[in-house]
Image (cartoon, rainbow, N blue to C red):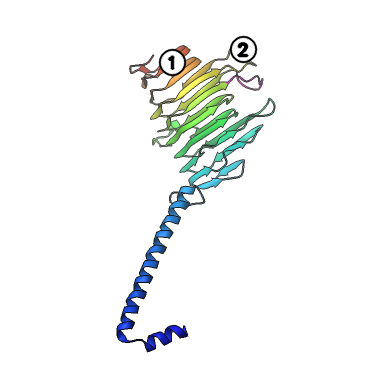
Amino acid sequence: MKEVKEFFENASPETTTRQSISVRRTLRRALLLGLLLSSLALRSALAAGPTGWGIGSCREVTAFPANLVDPGVYCLSYKHIDFPLMSGVLIKISANNVVLDLNGATLDGTPKRNGAFSWGIQSYGHSNITVRNGTIRGFNYGISLTAPLGYVNTTVRPSHSFLVENVRLIENRTAGMEVIGYDSVIRGNYVAHTGGSPDTGLSGHAWGIIAAGDGLRLIDNDVTYTHVNTAHSGGKTTAIYLSGGGNAAVVKNRMSEADFGVFSGGLNWRKYRGNITVYVTTPYTGGTDAGNNN
Protein backbone atom coordinates (compact mmCIF):
# COMPACT_ATOMS: atom_id res chain seq x y z
CA MET A 1 0.00 0.00 0.00
CA LYS A 2 2.90 2.40 0.76
CA GLU A 3 4.34 1.92 -2.75
CA VAL A 4 0.93 2.54 -4.36
CA LYS A 5 0.48 5.73 -2.31
CA GLU A 6 3.93 7.04 -3.25
CA PHE A 7 3.31 6.30 -6.93
CA PHE A 8 0.12 8.35 -7.05
CA GLU A 9 1.67 11.19 -5.00
CA ASN A 10 4.67 11.46 -7.34
CA ALA A 11 2.89 10.83 -10.62
CA SER A 12 1.83 13.59 -12.99
CA PRO A 13 -1.90 14.19 -13.60
CA GLU A 14 -1.57 12.69 -17.09
CA THR A 15 0.16 9.60 -15.74
CA THR A 16 -2.40 9.27 -12.98
CA THR A 17 -5.27 9.49 -15.46
CA ARG A 18 -3.76 6.87 -17.76
CA GLN A 19 -3.08 4.59 -14.81
CA SER A 20 -6.63 5.02 -13.46
CA ILE A 21 -8.08 4.07 -16.82
CA SER A 22 -5.80 1.04 -16.98
CA VAL A 23 -6.80 -0.02 -13.45
CA ARG A 24 -10.49 0.33 -14.27
CA ARG A 25 -10.08 -1.75 -17.43
CA THR A 26 -8.24 -4.45 -15.51
CA LEU A 27 -10.92 -4.54 -12.82
CA ARG A 28 -13.68 -4.68 -15.45
CA ARG A 29 -11.99 -7.60 -17.22
CA ALA A 30 -11.51 -9.43 -13.92
CA LEU A 31 -15.17 -8.92 -13.05
CA LEU A 32 -16.35 -10.24 -16.42
CA LEU A 33 -14.03 -13.23 -16.14
CA GLY A 34 -15.36 -13.96 -12.67
CA LEU A 35 -18.96 -13.84 -13.87
CA LEU A 36 -18.13 -16.16 -16.78
CA LEU A 37 -16.42 -18.69 -14.52
CA SER A 38 -19.33 -18.57 -12.07
CA SER A 39 -21.80 -19.23 -14.88
CA LEU A 40 -19.77 -22.18 -16.16
CA ALA A 41 -19.49 -23.60 -12.65
CA LEU A 42 -23.28 -23.36 -12.18
CA ARG A 43 -23.95 -25.11 -15.49
CA SER A 44 -21.47 -27.86 -14.60
CA ALA A 45 -23.10 -28.40 -11.21
CA LEU A 46 -26.57 -28.70 -12.73
CA ALA A 47 -25.35 -31.09 -15.44
CA ALA A 48 -23.51 -33.26 -12.94
CA GLY A 49 -26.76 -34.47 -11.43
CA PRO A 50 -28.91 -34.12 -8.35
CA THR A 51 -27.37 -32.49 -5.32
CA GLY A 52 -30.40 -31.19 -3.44
CA TRP A 53 -33.52 -29.10 -3.89
CA GLY A 54 -33.48 -26.38 -6.50
CA ILE A 55 -34.20 -25.49 -10.09
CA GLY A 56 -32.99 -28.22 -12.41
CA SER A 57 -32.07 -30.54 -9.56
CA CYS A 58 -33.70 -33.18 -7.40
CA ARG A 59 -33.40 -34.75 -4.00
CA GLU A 60 -31.45 -38.01 -3.94
CA VAL A 61 -32.94 -41.10 -2.34
CA THR A 62 -29.98 -42.83 -0.69
CA ALA A 63 -31.42 -45.01 2.11
CA PHE A 64 -33.81 -47.94 1.71
CA PRO A 65 -36.58 -48.71 2.44
CA ALA A 66 -37.54 -45.09 1.76
CA ASN A 67 -40.65 -43.04 2.54
CA LEU A 68 -41.06 -39.83 0.53
CA VAL A 69 -43.13 -37.55 2.76
CA ASP A 70 -42.67 -34.17 1.05
CA PRO A 71 -43.72 -32.89 -2.38
CA GLY A 72 -40.92 -32.44 -4.89
CA VAL A 73 -38.63 -34.14 -7.36
CA TYR A 74 -36.69 -37.19 -6.18
CA CYS A 75 -34.13 -39.32 -7.99
CA LEU A 76 -31.76 -42.22 -7.45
CA SER A 77 -28.00 -42.03 -7.72
CA TYR A 78 -27.24 -45.74 -7.26
CA LYS A 79 -27.52 -47.79 -10.44
CA HIS A 80 -28.52 -51.06 -8.78
CA ILE A 81 -30.43 -51.37 -5.51
CA ASP A 82 -30.51 -55.04 -4.50
CA PHE A 83 -32.90 -55.20 -1.55
CA PRO A 84 -34.74 -58.53 -1.16
CA LEU A 85 -38.02 -57.95 0.67
CA MET A 86 -40.19 -60.54 2.36
CA SER A 87 -42.84 -57.89 3.03
CA GLY A 88 -43.44 -54.16 2.82
CA VAL A 89 -42.46 -51.46 0.34
CA LEU A 90 -39.05 -50.46 -0.99
CA ILE A 91 -40.04 -46.87 -1.89
CA LYS A 92 -43.27 -45.48 -0.46
CA ILE A 93 -44.69 -42.17 -1.67
CA SER A 94 -46.66 -40.44 1.10
CA ALA A 95 -47.26 -37.00 -0.42
CA ASN A 96 -49.00 -35.33 -3.33
CA ASN A 97 -47.07 -33.72 -6.20
CA VAL A 98 -44.10 -36.08 -6.33
CA VAL A 99 -41.87 -36.97 -9.26
CA LEU A 100 -39.68 -40.04 -8.73
CA ASP A 101 -37.01 -40.36 -11.42
CA LEU A 102 -35.25 -43.70 -11.12
CA ASN A 103 -32.47 -42.21 -13.26
CA GLY A 104 -31.74 -45.52 -15.00
CA ALA A 105 -31.47 -47.49 -11.75
CA THR A 106 -32.69 -51.04 -11.11
CA LEU A 107 -34.72 -51.84 -7.99
CA ASP A 108 -34.35 -55.57 -7.36
CA GLY A 109 -36.51 -57.03 -4.60
CA THR A 110 -36.26 -60.70 -5.59
CA PRO A 111 -36.87 -62.63 -2.33
CA LYS A 112 -34.56 -65.38 -1.10
CA ARG A 113 -37.45 -67.76 -0.35
CA ASN A 114 -41.17 -68.25 -0.92
CA GLY A 115 -43.77 -66.48 1.19
CA ALA A 116 -42.85 -62.90 0.32
CA PHE A 117 -45.36 -60.16 -0.47
CA SER A 118 -43.81 -56.84 -1.39
CA TRP A 119 -44.08 -53.69 -3.50
CA GLY A 120 -41.31 -51.92 -5.36
CA ILE A 121 -42.98 -48.48 -5.38
CA GLN A 122 -46.29 -47.82 -3.67
CA SER A 123 -48.55 -44.85 -3.01
CA TYR A 124 -52.07 -44.88 -1.61
CA GLY A 125 -54.45 -41.94 -1.31
CA HIS A 126 -52.24 -39.31 -2.99
CA SER A 127 -52.33 -37.51 -6.35
CA ASN A 128 -50.13 -36.02 -9.07
CA ILE A 129 -47.43 -38.68 -8.86
CA THR A 130 -44.95 -39.55 -11.61
CA VAL A 131 -42.63 -42.57 -11.74
CA ARG A 132 -40.18 -42.82 -14.64
CA ASN A 133 -36.89 -44.02 -16.11
CA GLY A 134 -35.74 -47.27 -14.54
CA THR A 135 -36.17 -51.01 -13.96
CA ILE A 136 -38.18 -52.71 -11.21
CA ARG A 137 -37.74 -56.43 -10.67
CA GLY A 138 -38.78 -59.25 -8.35
CA PHE A 139 -41.64 -57.78 -6.29
CA ASN A 140 -45.24 -58.93 -6.08
CA TYR A 141 -46.28 -55.57 -7.50
CA GLY A 142 -43.60 -53.56 -9.26
CA ILE A 143 -45.57 -50.31 -8.99
CA SER A 144 -48.85 -49.64 -7.18
CA LEU A 145 -50.39 -46.15 -7.36
CA THR A 146 -53.96 -46.10 -6.06
CA ALA A 147 -56.48 -43.41 -5.24
CA PRO A 148 -58.38 -43.58 -1.92
CA LEU A 149 -60.89 -46.40 -1.56
CA GLY A 150 -64.31 -45.34 -2.79
CA TYR A 151 -63.00 -42.50 -4.97
CA VAL A 152 -65.42 -43.43 -7.78
CA ASN A 153 -68.38 -42.52 -5.59
CA THR A 154 -67.40 -38.89 -4.98
CA THR A 155 -69.86 -36.23 -6.16
CA VAL A 156 -67.09 -34.04 -7.58
CA ARG A 157 -64.81 -35.78 -10.06
CA PRO A 158 -61.25 -35.64 -8.69
CA SER A 159 -58.05 -35.75 -10.74
CA HIS A 160 -55.34 -38.05 -9.45
CA SER A 161 -52.99 -37.64 -12.42
CA PHE A 162 -50.74 -40.65 -12.04
CA LEU A 163 -48.05 -41.02 -14.71
CA VAL A 164 -45.82 -44.05 -15.24
CA GLU A 165 -43.44 -43.80 -18.19
CA ASN A 166 -40.28 -45.39 -19.52
CA VAL A 167 -40.13 -48.07 -16.82
CA ARG A 168 -39.09 -51.70 -17.30
CA LEU A 169 -41.01 -54.06 -15.02
CA ILE A 170 -39.40 -57.50 -15.12
CA GLU A 171 -40.20 -60.75 -13.30
CA ASN A 172 -42.67 -59.29 -10.84
CA ARG A 173 -44.77 -62.06 -9.42
CA THR A 174 -48.39 -60.85 -9.39
CA ALA A 175 -48.56 -57.68 -11.52
CA GLY A 176 -46.05 -55.47 -13.24
CA MET A 177 -47.98 -52.36 -12.25
CA GLU A 178 -51.30 -51.31 -10.75
CA VAL A 179 -52.51 -47.75 -11.46
CA ILE A 180 -55.95 -46.81 -10.16
CA GLY A 181 -57.06 -43.19 -10.34
CA TYR A 182 -58.67 -40.59 -12.59
CA ASP A 183 -56.69 -39.00 -15.47
CA SER A 184 -53.81 -41.45 -15.29
CA VAL A 185 -51.34 -42.09 -18.11
CA ILE A 186 -49.29 -45.24 -18.64
CA ARG A 187 -46.94 -44.91 -21.60
CA GLY A 188 -43.74 -46.22 -23.08
CA ASN A 189 -43.21 -49.02 -20.55
CA TYR A 190 -41.90 -52.57 -20.99
CA VAL A 191 -43.56 -55.25 -18.84
CA ALA A 192 -42.22 -58.79 -19.15
CA HIS A 193 -42.14 -62.19 -17.45
CA THR A 194 -44.81 -61.36 -14.89
CA GLY A 195 -45.99 -64.31 -12.78
CA GLY A 196 -44.63 -67.83 -13.12
CA SER A 197 -43.85 -68.17 -9.42
CA PRO A 198 -44.08 -71.53 -7.61
CA ASP A 199 -45.05 -69.72 -4.38
CA THR A 200 -48.22 -71.30 -2.95
CA GLY A 201 -49.10 -68.02 -1.20
CA LEU A 202 -49.84 -66.32 -4.52
CA SER A 203 -52.92 -66.36 -6.71
CA GLY A 204 -52.67 -68.45 -9.83
CA HIS A 205 -53.45 -65.37 -11.92
CA ALA A 206 -50.99 -62.79 -13.21
CA TRP A 207 -51.41 -59.38 -14.84
CA GLY A 208 -48.97 -57.25 -16.78
CA ILE A 209 -50.86 -54.00 -16.15
CA ILE A 210 -53.91 -53.42 -13.94
CA ALA A 211 -55.53 -50.02 -14.44
CA ALA A 212 -58.75 -48.19 -13.62
CA GLY A 213 -60.17 -44.67 -13.51
CA ASP A 214 -62.01 -42.26 -15.76
CA GLY A 215 -59.77 -40.59 -18.34
CA LEU A 216 -57.26 -43.46 -18.33
CA ARG A 217 -54.78 -43.65 -21.22
CA LEU A 218 -52.44 -46.54 -22.01
CA ILE A 219 -50.13 -45.67 -24.89
CA ASP A 220 -47.20 -47.42 -26.56
CA ASN A 221 -46.51 -50.11 -23.95
CA ASP A 222 -45.00 -53.56 -24.50
CA VAL A 223 -46.48 -56.33 -22.35
CA THR A 224 -45.07 -59.77 -22.96
CA TYR A 225 -44.63 -63.21 -21.38
CA THR A 226 -47.27 -63.10 -18.65
CA HIS A 227 -47.19 -66.51 -16.92
CA VAL A 228 -49.54 -68.43 -14.66
CA ASN A 229 -48.18 -68.88 -11.15
CA THR A 230 -47.38 -72.57 -11.18
CA ALA A 231 -48.45 -73.46 -7.62
CA HIS A 232 -52.11 -73.20 -8.67
CA SER A 233 -54.11 -74.77 -11.45
CA GLY A 234 -56.66 -72.84 -13.47
CA GLY A 235 -54.94 -69.48 -13.30
CA LYS A 236 -55.28 -66.95 -16.13
CA THR A 237 -52.92 -64.35 -17.47
CA THR A 238 -53.85 -60.90 -18.77
CA ALA A 239 -51.60 -58.36 -20.46
CA ILE A 240 -53.78 -55.27 -19.77
CA TYR A 241 -56.67 -55.54 -17.32
CA LEU A 242 -59.05 -52.59 -17.06
CA SER A 243 -60.97 -52.82 -13.81
CA GLY A 244 -63.69 -50.67 -12.25
CA GLY A 245 -65.60 -48.00 -14.16
CA GLY A 246 -64.66 -45.06 -16.32
CA ASN A 247 -63.61 -44.48 -19.91
CA ALA A 248 -60.19 -45.46 -21.20
CA ALA A 249 -58.13 -45.23 -24.38
CA VAL A 250 -55.77 -48.10 -25.14
CA VAL A 251 -53.62 -47.08 -28.10
CA LYS A 252 -50.63 -48.59 -29.93
CA ASN A 253 -49.71 -51.21 -27.34
CA ARG A 254 -48.04 -54.54 -28.15
CA MET A 255 -49.07 -57.64 -26.22
CA SER A 256 -47.85 -61.22 -26.49
CA GLU A 257 -47.89 -64.55 -24.67
CA ALA A 258 -51.03 -64.23 -22.51
CA ASP A 259 -54.52 -65.68 -22.18
CA PHE A 260 -56.09 -62.21 -22.56
CA GLY A 261 -54.75 -59.14 -24.32
CA VAL A 262 -56.98 -56.21 -23.32
CA PHE A 263 -59.68 -57.26 -20.86
CA SER A 264 -62.23 -54.57 -20.09
CA GLY A 265 -65.44 -56.41 -19.28
CA GLY A 266 -68.58 -55.15 -20.96
CA LEU A 267 -67.94 -51.41 -20.74
CA ASN A 268 -68.31 -50.06 -24.27
CA TRP A 269 -66.92 -46.57 -23.55
CA ARG A 270 -63.44 -48.04 -23.22
CA LYS A 271 -61.84 -47.90 -26.65
CA TYR A 272 -58.78 -49.56 -28.11
CA ARG A 273 -57.05 -48.67 -31.37
CA GLY A 274 -53.89 -49.64 -33.23
CA ASN A 275 -52.83 -52.41 -30.84
CA ILE A 276 -51.02 -55.63 -31.77
CA THR A 277 -51.36 -59.04 -30.12
CA VAL A 278 -49.19 -62.10 -30.77
CA TYR A 279 -49.84 -65.53 -29.24
CA VAL A 280 -52.75 -64.19 -27.19
CA THR A 281 -55.69 -66.58 -26.82
CA THR A 282 -58.38 -63.89 -26.50
CA PRO A 283 -57.01 -60.59 -27.82
CA TYR A 284 -59.86 -58.24 -26.82
CA THR A 285 -62.68 -58.66 -24.32
CA GLY A 286 -65.34 -55.97 -23.92
CA GLY A 287 -64.85 -52.33 -24.77
CA THR A 288 -65.08 -50.89 -28.28
CA ASP A 289 -62.78 -51.71 -31.18
CA ALA A 290 -61.88 -48.31 -32.66
CA GLY A 291 -59.92 -49.85 -35.53
CA ASN A 292 -56.51 -51.07 -36.67
CA ASN A 293 -56.19 -53.74 -33.96
CA ASN A 294 -54.88 -57.21 -34.70
Q: Which mark is residue 253?
A: none
Q: Is residue 237 above or below residue 47?
A: above
Disc 2 marks which amino acid? Ser
Question: x, y (%) of residue 41?
Answer: 45, 56
Other-residue count near label 2 (Cα within 10 Å), few / some / many at <14 / 14–19 / ≥20 = few
Out of 129 and 9, give the one closest to the viewer. 9
Question: x, y (%) of residue 113?
Answer: 70, 26
Other-residue count near label 1 (Cα within 10 Å), few / some / many at <14 / 14–19 / ≥20 = many
Tell me which corner region of the image, top left, top right, bottom left or bottom right, holds residue 235: top right
Out of 157 and 278, give the one closest to the viewer. 278
Q: Which residue is mark 2?
A: 233
Q: Residue furthest bottom?
A: 10
Residue plotted at (50% across, 48% down): 50
Disc 1 marks which amino acid? Thr
Left or right: 60, with 213 as reference point: right
Residue 148 appears in the picture as rendered: no
Q: What main secondary structure does the magenta stretch of the protein show?
A: loop
Q: Which residues are magenta?
A: 195-203
Q: Secondary structure at mark 1?
A: strand
Q: Which residue is mark 1?
A: 277
Q: Earlier in the sequence, mark 2 or mark 1?
A: 2
Residue plotted at (53% across, 17% down): 237
Q: Check residue 197 for magenta coloring.
A: yes
Left or right: 202, with 74 as reference point: right
Q: Secondary structure at mark 2?
A: loop
Residue plotted at (43% across, 49% down): 56
Inter-mark Cα distance, 2 to 1: 25 Å
